[in-house]
Amino acid sequence: MPRHQWCDRARQALHVASLAALVSVCADTGSVIAQGRPPQVQSVRLYVFDCGVLVRGEPTNYNLTREQVGDTNFADACYLVAHPKGTLLWDVGIIPDAQIPPGGVELPVGTGGNRNKAQRTLIGQLAELGYKPADITYLAVSHSHADHVANANAYAGSTWLVQRAEREAMFSAQAQTTVAFPTYSALKNSKTVDLTGDHDVFGDGAVVIKSTPGHTPGHQSLFVKLPRTGGVLLTVSMLDPAPNSPLSVTVPHGVALDAGMGFSVGTDPMRVRPFETCNNTGCIALVTVDADTLRSLSTNMGGQVVVAVAGNTSPVTIPFSLNGFADGYAELERAKARRTSFFGFLNR
Ligand SMILES: [Zn+2]
């Protein structure tokens, strides 16, 4: 019999004089049970946690000017995906929880006046939802830079989902000298699923890790299909292979609120483009594809779009994969040749 039923029956059966004591025992037991079990969800939920801010003065490292970005700081987010079959924690912050006192902390980075700050611990934000580290089924990070792995050791008991190339880089001799290494070193002994591409986390297509190498050797992105929002994915498409034709970038609703977005491929400079229009899938910006851009698109593995996010004053960089672009572009040229010859035949 579940404990709360036992308490209810016992309450009914017992003499009034002993009731108060039993109620307090049952109430205590009830709260222990609530702490002991994570919330069970019926459908996929996505929670976004505040894991701090990278206070940065100069956006020139990202080929942007102060005027273009307005706010030069970066938001650092952590995410919890709750699925009926388990939980996935995605990215774990920039400052370890142990270094965040009540009220927050701001720590200098290097000598250029950069700082990292965090107001709230990740473990505290998880606890507010009823989760503790032992309730996290899977841990995954987008990549192993210091602003995504600060609390990784606390989740070493979860199953770690990582691209093999990233794991090998994380435990190389060079990586072991970095400031980030001690924050994730315990993952070496974690139960690990070595990935070499995309991975459907719960087997139903609702939470899919996408391999998007480029920023780091095993960078990965997360696709989450939410019951009401549906799938959210940034798309880059091209309709005409001719030089100087436009590349269409669609940024999903809820992400783009600024008048435009920044776009870059590989190490090319960031170009800021206005949104031309919005439709039911998102807002569309056009990037003119000259011969140089085409070369970059065909030879790089990744690019990035910088956009604003509702309720967040810092711009957010969304990496995208260019895996397959070269093949797709070649096919586009062949398709155009076929189309031209078809119309040529009609006009004869
Ligand atoms: Zn990074």
Image (cartoon, rainbow, N blue to C red):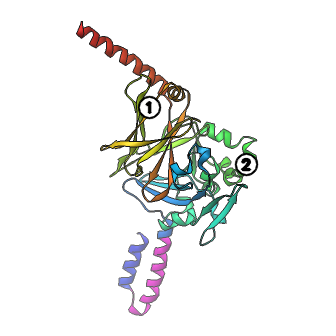
**Among the two numbered marks 1 and 2 on one chain, the one whose residue lies closer to the N terminus:** 2
Is 12 located above or below residue 136 in the figure? below
The amino acid type of the residue labelled 1 equals: Thr
Q: Look at the image and tell me whether residue 208 can be seen.
A: no
Vertical arrangement, residue 328 with respect to residue 260, above or below: above
Would you say residue 305 sits in the magenta stretch? no
Q: Alpha carbon of mark 1 to alpha carbon of mark 2: how far?
A: 39 Å
Residue designated by label 2 = 178
**Looking at the image, which is closer to me, 242 or 239?**
242
Q: Which mark is residue 239?
A: none
Label 1, on which residue? 288
Residue 134: % across, % down: 56, 59
Place of residue 313 in the rendered image (x, y in percent of width and height, measured from the top left): 49, 58
The residue depicted at 29 percent of the width and 12 percent of the height is 342
> Alpha-carbon neighbours of circle 1 within 10 Å: few (<14), some, or many (≥20)?
some
Q: Position of residue 290 (x, y in %)?
A: 48, 27
Q: Is residue 315 visible?
A: yes
- Left or right of 225? Residue 29 is right
Count of labels in the image:
2
Q: Amino acid at mark 2?
A: Thr
Quarter of the figure that contains the C terminus: top left
Q: Which residues are magenta?
A: 14-33
The one of 100 and 198 positioned closer to us in this rendering: 100
Q: Main secondary structure of the magenta part?
A: helix
Q: Check if residue 19 falls in the magenta segment.
A: yes
